[in-house]
Amino acid sequence: MLHFHNHNHCHIPLCRQQPMKFCMSSVFYFLVIITIFLPLIVADLNSDKQALLEFHAAVPHRRNLNWNSTNPICTTWVGITCAQDNSSVLALRLPGVGFIGRIPSNTLGKLGALKILSLRSNRFIGDLPSDITSLPSLQYLYLQHNNFTGDLPASFSLQLNVLDLSFNSFTGNISETIQNLTSLTRLNLQNNNLSGAIPNLNLTRLKQLNLSYNQLSGRIPSSLQRFPSSSFIGNSLLCGPPLQACSLSPSPSPSPTFSPPPPEFPKKQGSKKKLSLGVIIAIAVGGSVVLLLLALIILCCCLKKKDNGRSSVLKGKASGGGRSEKPKEEFGSGVQEPEKNKLVFFEGCSYNFDLEDLLRASAEVLGKGSYGTAYKAVLEESTTVVVKRLKEVVVGKKDFEQQMEIIGRVGQHPNVVPLRAYYYSKDEKLLVYDYIPGGSLSTLLHGDRGGGRSPLDWESRVKISLGIARGISHVHSMGGPKFTHGNIKSSNVLINQEHDGCISDLGLTPLMNVPATPSRSVGYRAPEVIETRGYNLW
Ligand SMILES: Nc1ncnc2c1ncn2[C@@H]1O[C@H](COP(=O)(O)OP(=O)(O)OP(=O)(O)O)[C@@H](O)[C@H]1O
């Protein structure tokens, strides 16, 4: 790269003839190279840092990001992921941190190695600088749920894998340049003000497309007809499969072939028949009955919807496909004051999402326990957590927070599943744990009773039991004299990557209105002694 040998000053014969001079000139060139190129090696991170500081200074925000020029960027700055050798910033994830305002160009657009940019759920306004969308290494761009305006940028990084600009106020056409994004797997532009025709996007890797709720018009290109109608609904001027067929005659005069025939009203003049009184009464009675039935059905639907309203938290995206509802509508009173009711993260937790992100995540029910329902929630790439939705919490906010503080502190042990965050409001109490992919000891022992199941060997049982014992011992030594796990059973023992047992769900009993099991709150008793409902013997 340096092409040192091309510089005629130090070709080999000369060096042989003048060894001393050669040495001196070598040292000189070496120093020159170091002086010139060493700063270039670290320049990447420094220039990234500078660009981030400029962005930070220019855009007001609510949450403290700890972006202090004296702190190391890769380890202390919130939302930053660096390359392994700390040479550059690879990901910037700052969803829901309360940014308000425009993104100035020449700030984030200078992060030359950036692969992931997530600025979802903030309050950005104005144009999206094109230097961001065309960042050369950018693969994932999440800018949904902001208030960007102006035309969609026309230049995009050719590496883009995911482009989500949904729920903004972008105007203008969808640029044909999107056709060049051959790596694109997900394109979400729903709920903007985009207009014009959809370009023919022959993108074979594209798996998810959402252009719904814009003002797009014309025929859906054949290359996109493989997507469901939910990808296009809410664009009244759009036609062709999978939506309704296009009218062949665009002229205002209705075409006899393709326009629906006008409704046939009885002609006053032409009709000479008069209805008898009996028929009129029958129609009136029948009509009233139908109306009454309709009213009843609507009432039932409304009541059912209201009932399901609260339990729709975290279910919203589980089915995928259609237009996603705004979480505030789903969540009801629990998020009416987002400033006050926020997720509380414990110290040392590297997660960086907020309540809205959590509610928007696709979720799957893991199971319903005595304390509530556990969901597996998949946030952005590589972030999977378990959200436990507590029911029948009987203590007030202060006691709840105190107990959380103890659980958070006690959970710092390899054999305890750590509680990462919690959320408390009048109507909603959520706990966020790491997702442990190994599943529970209960499933390991009792799950899949098909013929092919081999029982858990003794070595594993001993290892898991020792892990549980270490976890419990730690809980007792750290939690103080009154703090116990309170609900030890095999579904609350999860198997970590080292095939070790980790206890979860500790310390919840004092919060709940669980059926009276007298000895639970005062200390550990074997589950088969105190458990009044079904239990698993291991
Ligand atoms: N952090 C986690 N990672 C993976 N799976 C989990 C996690 N937490 C809970 N689970 C699993 O989710 C399911 C439901 O768990 P949950 O704790 O809600 O109910 P439970 O353990 O059956 O009863 P209880 O509410 O009395 O603890 C269980 O199968 C459990 O093993």
Image: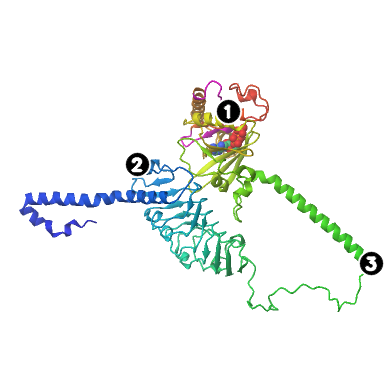
> Is residue 498 a member of the stretch shown in magenta?
yes
**Residue at 82% across / 58% down in the picture?**
291
Is disc 1 placed on a helix, strand or loop? loop
Give coordinates of residue 187: x percent, y percent: 51, 59
Numbered disc in front, either 2 or 1: 2
Residue with the mark numbered 2:
70
Residue with the mark numbered 1:
488
Q: Residue 121 got which mark?
A: none
**Residue at 51% across / 43% down in the picture?**
384
Q: Quadrant of the C terminus?
A: top right
Give coordinates of residue 237: x percent, y percent: 61, 68
Crowding at mark 2 (Cα within 10 Å: few <14, some 14-19, many 20+): few
Question: First in sequence: mark 3 or mark 1?
Answer: 3
Residue with the mark numbered 3:
277
Question: First in sequence: mark 3 or mark 2?
Answer: 2
Q: CA distance from mark 2 to mark 1?
A: 46 Å
Q: Is residue 494 above or below residue 180?
A: above
Give coordinates of residue 294: x percent, y percent: 79, 56
Q: Main secondary structure of the magenta part?
A: loop
Crowding at mark 1 (Cα within 10 Å: few <14, some 14-19, many 20+): some
Q: CA distance from mark 3 to mark 1?
A: 76 Å
Which quadrant contains ligand 1?
top right
**Residue at 36% across / 45% down in the picture?**
84
Residue 339 appears anywhere in the view: yes
- Find the magenta span and give its range: 478-499
